[in-house]
Amino acid sequence: MIKAGKGRALRIGRREFVKIAAAASARVLLLGTHGWVARAATGDSSRKRLVVVFLRGAVDGLNVVVPYGDDAYYEARPTLAIPRRGDGAVVDLDGHFGLHPALAPLMPLWRDGTLAFIHACGSPDPTRSHFDAQDYMESGTPGIKSTPDGWMNRVLGVLPGHSATSVLSLGPVVPRILSGRMPVANLPLGRGAARPIALDNPRIEQAFDRLYDGADPLSRAYQQGRLARARLIGELRQDMIAADNGAPSPEGFPQDAERLAGLIQHDPSIRLAFTALGGWDTHVNEGASRGQLANHLAQLGQGLALFANQLGPAWDDTVVLVISEFGRTMHENGNGGTDHGHGNVMWVMGGAVRGGKVYGNWPGLGRGELYQERDLAVTTDFRAPILAVLQTHLGLTPTQLATVFPDAPTTASTPWLIRV
Amino acid sequence: MSAIGVAKQPLHLVNRLAFGPRPGDLETVARLKPQAWLAQQLHPESLPEPPALTEAIAQLDTLRMTPPELFAQFGPPMAVMGVKPDPAVVKAARRAARVVVQQAMAARVYRAVLETRQLREVMVAFWFNHFNIFADKGLDYLWVGAFEEDAIRPHVFGRFRDLLGATARHPAMLFYLDNWQNTAPDAPGARRRFEGINENYARELMELHTLGVNGGYTQADVTALAHILTGWGIVRRENPARPNFARRQRRLAAMGAVRTREGFFFDPTRHDFADKVWLGRTIHGSGIEEGEKALDVLAQSPATAHHLSFKLCQYFVADNPPADLVGRLAQRYLETDGSIREVLLGLFASSEFWDLGHYANKFKSPYEFVISAVRATGLPVRNVQPLIGTMAMLGMPLYGCQTPDGYKNTQDAWLNPDAMMMRLSFAAALGAGRLPIDRPPTDFMTDNPRHPPRALLERTGMAADDGIAAEATPDPIELAMTVGDMFSARTTAAVEAAPNNLRAALILGSPEFMMR
């Protein structure tokens, strides 16, 4: 019998529970409809954790961290450029780059040195297909489609102190980045996450237990689902009750981010989290300081700032990466938007980050400097910053890093990006 | 490799070419013999529409409206004399317009559940997904149903070129992938929001609709195709009382403008009339003919033949389809000028389709699971909302796939722990007669159809402890006879051991019923 909140108990046969629990020493759970959290095995003392936010649809990095020192940027974007000064101006970062004004809530993190960017970052693969590029960024093997698992699943497989680990996630489907050998269980979250379902009725559940007591894929999914509900629903329910006191929760990403922070505070053994946000494919009416992209960035910036704030001391043990499959064309198109491009900006934040700096070798936006004469070039492989985080922050060994990113460019010999 | 035996053939056919058996279906296939049933399915005009379905569809009046009519009746209110409409008026219009997408959903589900010409419904779902559009992007909330009715449904067994052409000209697709704004930068009509090239549609047309991502095209080909498709757009609301209206119309017609009743508009004043080099050939600047030529080339390409054959085999045979079969069907596609019916005939006659190793090896998608469960019960459906809501909970909202690649059709994509929990909760609610699918929807306008159904989100037991009266409850013995002899000893034992009022739920939630 496992307590599941409000004094109700969800029953799983003891034998099954022991069996599943043994396999479930690390778990992942989702926030909102697209996020996941992984927990460490008991016995692993490390509290270092990594949160990955994937902006699906290719965010326009040149309007996130704006190269306002480049005249070419303004020539290429007569209506989409973020102005240098005046109404809706960039928020200066380092005299050459400036932040989109909608991301102003992140400036305190920049000033206290816990927010960094890597510009002109991206994939060595030239594809401008959303689906292939996301696939490569999630498998961690650009150009190779046959890779069966996602790189975050491989991280779970090598996290120090783990023998058998499994993953528990929330949401209707499991993302590529988390799929693989490590078992994945998921739960709904968002608004209705903690609500009971018909299957929670003990008579119904007992009957189905008999149908799914095997070791086949359907039975395994069933057993992990039952375990996930039993172990997490109570916790979520408490969180939601707590969140309902006081001010109404913000909607969308800020709400999910707040909930993620709450779960991490409850359970310091959470090691990996993943969340994905859509709506960045701005072919039309992208807007500049205001408009479509600005609205999306405002949500994201507000959520991330809330998350950092809410974590309190746990912020020191947390690194957040914000990634997207590729950047967008330097020139705006004819419909107030941008088309699929190449290089982009990666965001890195957290107490351990050596922030207040825009990293990367800036290739420039002039003639001859663009990739295929149209896009920001890639000078930093997207795996390089991730490797730095895995190495310095999560403490993976060179062998483990090679498991997570086979054939990645060699890792830096001296630590960068993350404080030792 | 051994072939599926005679006893299993009806269930195999009804699971693959239909959304699973309704009461009596397996007997019908056995009586007609598979070949005759198959022939009927490939020629749906040879069978009548079930009267109950005709009656249900007749209620859905917006289904018969064209995109311009839908826009005129349900579109956002326009500014009058430069004065923007009151936000409350805009909101009310948007609310009133919800009936359009809700009727499209109702039509889709009624047909999937009730239609005897099931293969056509399977193919409508398949091709809609191949040419996916998202109902929540901009004006597509008005046009998603019309897209399915006019661009997909009439062509599902025809030449692929016709299907491709119908989608290319449909306002819903032109809007979804932004081509309606794609404009030659120096063209006389290039102004305001029609100022330049937008390559969104051109890219997905090659990557997703035809050649496939490895189909051998470059970024330069994407850009060239975008130029070829400049001016392919949507009819705009025009005021005939404007001065020079008639003259402008005549001038446009002389330049090669094309408009259709469905709302397609080729605007020559926004077209790039220069010659283009695309896929290694020169396309002479001539207007709309360039785009038609490009669609011809794409439809006839061996890469397209392979891409489509792969997807069809993945749907009908196995998640990892046999390469040899894909190759043979691609060949057949090329030999028959891209006839979908001929490719399907070849597929259904292949030894791979009838290979016992492929029997019941496909994990149902959420859509297939929900539809097949309702079909198996034989219950009447008057209210599709609980079914639509369940699909959304399972991660497959109808008309709700945001990205143009559509939903996947593999076990990897859909089997996960939460999916099992939600599927079984649905089976429990449906098996206990607690989904209000038999109740006529009281008011189309009030509810978000994608809301989770209440019966799934409550610990509904067998007892109606919350005041929801049970609907008609499926009889477990009839249900078992409908779905045929497919159960393992474990499932049979579990069903037998369960109390009678749980048995229907266990059958619908059995591992065997998850597969097709």
Image (cartoon, coloured by chain):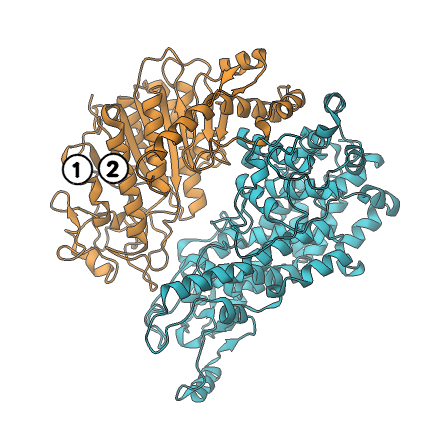
Chain colours: A orange, B cyan
Residue B465 appears in the picture as rendered: yes
Q: Is residue B379 left or right of residue A23?
A: right
Residue B29 quadrant: top right
Task: Name the residue type under label 1.
Answer: Pro
What is the spatial separation of the Cα atoms under label 2 and label 1, in whole angstroms?
A: 9 Å
Q: Nearer the viewer, residue A166 or B361?
A: A166
- Local SS, label 1: helix
Residue A297: x %, y % from top left: 29, 47
Marks 2,1: beta carbons within 8 A: yes
Q: Earlier in the sequence, mark 2 or mark 1?
A: 1
Residue A188: x %, y % from top left: 48, 33
Residue under the point 28% across and 29% down: A319
As drawn, B314 above or below A236: below
Report the disc number at residue B235. none
> Which residue matches tag 1?
A108
Residue A364: x %, y % from top left: 20, 49
- Crowding around mark 2 (Cα neighbors within 10 Å: few <14, some 14 to 19, many 20+) is many
Residue B242 quadrant: bottom left
Which part of the image, by quadrant, shows the C terminus of chain B?
A: top right
Residue A123 appears in the picture as rendered: no
Task: Name the residue type under label 2.
Answer: Ala
Q: Which residue is at the far right? A: B31
Report the disc number at residue A305. 2
Provide the chain ID for the residue under circle 1: A
Which part of the image, by quadrant, shows the N terminus of chain B?
A: top right
